[in-house]
Amino acid sequence: MGRQLRDCRGLAELRGWEVREYVDNDLSAFKRGVKRPQFETMLRDLANGVVDGVVVYNLDRLARQPVDLERVIEVYETNPGLTFATLEGDINLASDDGLTMARVMVAFANKASLDTGRRTRRKHRELAEAGQPVGRRTFGWQSDLRTLDPAEAPLARQAVTEVLDGIPLAHVVRRWNDAGVTTTTGNRWSSQTLRKYLQNPRLVGLRTHRGEVLLTPTGEPVHGAWEPLIDGETWERLCLHFEARKLSEPSGARRGARKYLLTGLVRCGVCHGLMFGSKAREDGRFNYVCDRTAQDGHRVAISGHPTDRAALNLTFRRLTLQTEISGPEPWDGEDALREVNEQIAELMRAYDEHELPGRLVFPRVAALEALREKAARDREAWLVATTGPRLAPVSADEWAKLDQVELRARLDATWQAIYVRPVTQRTGRFDPERLDFVERETLTSGAAPQG
């Protein structure tokens, strides 16, 4: 761009012209729908007599679409005497020969752009089919686009684990930004950026093309020539986790912003409604109170800090008793799905090598593809049913380092609700026996302990 401007200035200086520059940097004259603000300004100035002509490096710098050239020609036809010059020579847009020459040159420039675009698209398609990585470096990989980065990859894996454990994206983002962890373009992370990153098929080694996972002729995803960050099942659970959150939470919901630890978990043992933290006193003490107390005539409240401690202590004891991360049994249709894919691949190979005719191959492939689609739906249903936080065993040192958001995620993963029974005898002391903990995996729809 700089060289072209210098050359145009030089030509104008030789002819004694004063110049007004119109520069649309990095805006294509070929792509349809691209608005070039300076091009539009130049046309208005030409039509209004602000300038007496145009100097461009060559014609295809001005227009590569015939429709744009015709707009320029219209201005020249209605304003006789305007000059048009290029580094390759003047063009008289007021003469038939000049118009023909300009139209032919733009048509050839347009065709050249189309040919270049076609070759580029084909090249990118070939690279995608071969699983070759291209483009900007993705967080978690080194600059060769193939090898995992020893500093970023563990951070990404930790983020995956935390999100599946129920840690809000905003909490992970805040910690990364505070630690100076940036995107590969040097920007700060946002929840939206992190969600998009964690849903990127590249994390499991799948090659995409034009925004979609690329498939082989037999319907299998193309795997890229780089180290995957996580396994496929984990990634599917992660994507389902985001989908479930999108459906279950209202727009704009802010998880992790609760003032009190047990808000949303602690419930009244009489009416089973949610209990909320009261305004804290000067000494910091507060109560969890049933908000239906006044209208229903019952009084259920419990001291906040001791209730928090009791819930945390019980949750910690449960996690320390675990010896391994609990997870679902493997999907029992995996072998059958693999066999269907192998049969499809074998039939297509036989067709490609002219061993079997299409009239025999394609009906059988269609039937197998129907089986594959059903198996895929069954597998997704299994993933939905088994997706949920799977908390690892935790040590006392690890537990002590968790902040309130991380503690809350473990409470959410462990308990469906914590019910508070009404006081039977006033003693002025906290009674942990008033608390009924309902495990998440054992609560049935509508069930609640009786007060």
Image (spheres, helix red, strand yellow):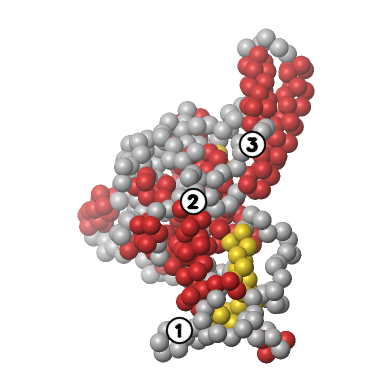
Would you identify the image quadrant in which residue 27 lies? bottom left
Residue that numbered label 2 is attached to? 321
Q: Looking at the image, is 330 positioned above or below residue 39?
A: above
Would you identify the image quadrant in which residue 380 lies? top right
Q: Is residue 192 visible?
A: no
Q: Position of residue 450 (x, y in %)?
A: 72, 71
Q: Position of residue 390 (x, y in %)?
A: 53, 50
- Tell which of 317 and 66 is nearer to you: 317
The mark found on residue 285 in the picture is 1
Answer left or right for 21 relative to 116: left
Q: Which circle, 2 or 3, is nearer the viewer?
A: 2
- Residue type at numbered disc 2: Leu
Q: Position of residue 340 (x, y in %)?
A: 68, 25
Q: Which circle, 2 or 1, is nearer the viewer?
A: 2
What residue is shown at x 70% (from left), y 67% (from top)?
448
What residue is shown at x 31% (from left), y 42% (from top)?
150
Q: Looking at the image, is 303 positioned above or below residue 84?
A: below
Residue that numbered label 3 is attached to? 331
- Residue type at numbered disc 1: Arg
What residue is shown at x 37% (from left), y 62% (from top)?
400
